Amino acid sequence: MEKAKVAFFDFASCEGDQLQVINLEEDLLKVVEAVEIVSFREAMKGHSDDYDIAFVEGSVTRRSDEARLKEIRKNAKVLVALGACATLGGVNLLKNFQEAENVRKFVYGDKAFQYETYPARPLKAVVPVDIDIHGCPINRHEFVMVFKSLLLGKKPEIPNYPVCVECKMAESICVFEMGMTCLGPVTRAGCGACCVTEGSYCWGCRGLVDNPNADSQREVLAKYGLGLRDILNKFRLYSGFSEVAQ
Amino acid sequence: MALQIIEKSDLAFFVQNLMDHFQLEGVQSKGQSVYGQAFFYGTIRSPAELCLDFDCTVMPPKKYFLPPQEALFRFQTGPSPACFECRPNKPLVIFGIHPYDLKAISQMDRVFAAGTPDPHYLARREATILIGIDPTHVAPRSFWASMEAAVVSSGFDLMMTDLGANYIVETGSEKGKALLGDYAKVRPATSDEVRQRVSQRSHIADMGQKRGLTFPKREIPILLQHSLTSPLWEENATKCLSCGTCNLVCPTCYCFDVWDDMELNLTQGQRLRRWDGCLLSDFARVATGENFRGTRTSRYRHRFYRKGQYLFFGILDDVACVGCGRCAAFCLPDIADPVEVFNRLKEKLN
């Protein structure tokens, strides 16, 4: 059987999700063996437009990005969004809630006029996306799971339950009981509740579950002392594109 | 075997001996939360780590018999397909289980033995020795007295009660008897100490009455029979986060999901199972995409019927709730408390 051809691409991002792929350790060799990687700027030389599966990191932040993304979509049989910037818009989207001119001047100073920009958005706002691998950064195990599903020709099982489930499995003390607040109850699991397990709280980097009870989550956050502004900011950090954050 | 006494000064000797001969699991404080200490079951590595005066652990001991995730078997596909057993039987001693959790384990034993017996659960149960301890403190949301779980007379290998100066120990099985004989320093209890145990246990039952049902537990199935269309379900479910916490912390919630995980070579793999929960939105979703309990209300209501009716008839002849109060304590919108729900249903019915 001919090996599937795989390509990696990136838009506005820190490229940390591709780094997670390179960081697969012993699994990386098996991944490389199972497919033919034809393009992966962060890891190798060479490029080909002949590929079956495209993993795309980053959010779309310029009108000129759209044509390139549409070209990738046209070439690929399967397009996978890789990481929070690609699946949600990610932290890049924070600029959407500020005055565009101020943001441009803050970043580029008096050269701002040289740089094109527009409101940041996830890939799915521009082209149809087949699979989302969430996270900032992605969970390597989940990448391998999706990768295997693609090779087997089956739909990957991306969790649609919240981080609370993995938190309970990891036997962490609930963040709310530690005097902090957390987006875990409405955030899609799949990270193994890593932030809470390490003593922090859930920032919501994997986005919301399919049918979040945002009203109840807002009430809970308010009950634990968060004002409306803080609540909105919490949702906006990663899920600025969802209606919950508007 | 008559009741035995372990002096408090000899407890460390017993614990150390168990550590030397078994994997010893027990209650530990994992740190301070804003509500007090957070207790969890974990591996005991020194006698000082073992806590016996906890009020309630965050997670019940069910993980020892039904781990959050486990491999059911390994397999190989291709021209010579094969299947390999994953049969767990690591011997364990769990030291310090409250009566309500012992009762929950007894109920789960019946559930997992009924119908098609579950070999994984049963093998783990078989390999585990349970040492119970009567509570000295009641967690704020517990209501185990209402659920007739303040005291248990079976379902343990050893059962200890703190009498202040020492522990009085009841033997519940041959395994328990051997454990005491081989690893503890004991002496027979005096008749005074036996009487002290009786009064201590009735004191515990009184402590447990601080909150509870306003009506006898056995009426729950009939109450539910008349409450199918109660507005309470939707009223509470509107606030439900569908986070599954009430399921996951429950000692009698045992549902799981099963799936196959292939290796990257795509020829070998394993069949896994993982905790699931009926409050999670996709719990009743099937392969075609249909979801048989697609609304929060239907999922929320289901849990109470599962506890109060579905398991009652046929398998347990009892309510599948032991009154630990974990669901109530850890539900962020605070809608999961069975005492609140059952009492309110009763009120509305009257």
Image (spheres, coloured by chain):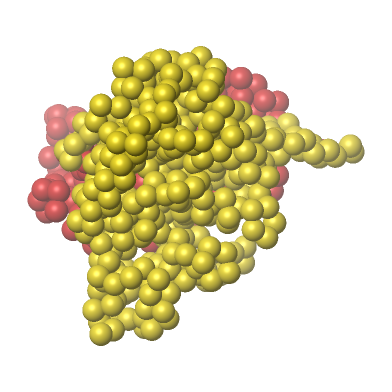
Where is residue A29 drawn, in percent x and y?
Answer: 65, 21
Specify whether B65 is left or right of B81.
left
Where is residue B310 drawn, in percent x and y?
Answer: 51, 70
Height in image: A192 above or below B202?
above
Q: Is residue A231 visible?
A: yes
Specify whether B245 is left or right of B65.
left
- What colour is chain B? yellow
Q: Nearer the viewer, residue B106 or A74?
A: B106
Where is residue A34 drawn, in percent x and y?
Answer: 70, 31
| Residue at image location 62% in from the left, 38% down from the top | B126
Where is residue B37 drawn, in percent x and y?
Answer: 23, 34
| Residue at image location 58% in from the left, 32% down from the top | B175
Position of the C terminus of chain B by quadrant? bottom left
Q: Nearer the viewer, residue A63 or B337?
A: B337
The outermost residue toward the front is B191
* Chain the render paints red: A
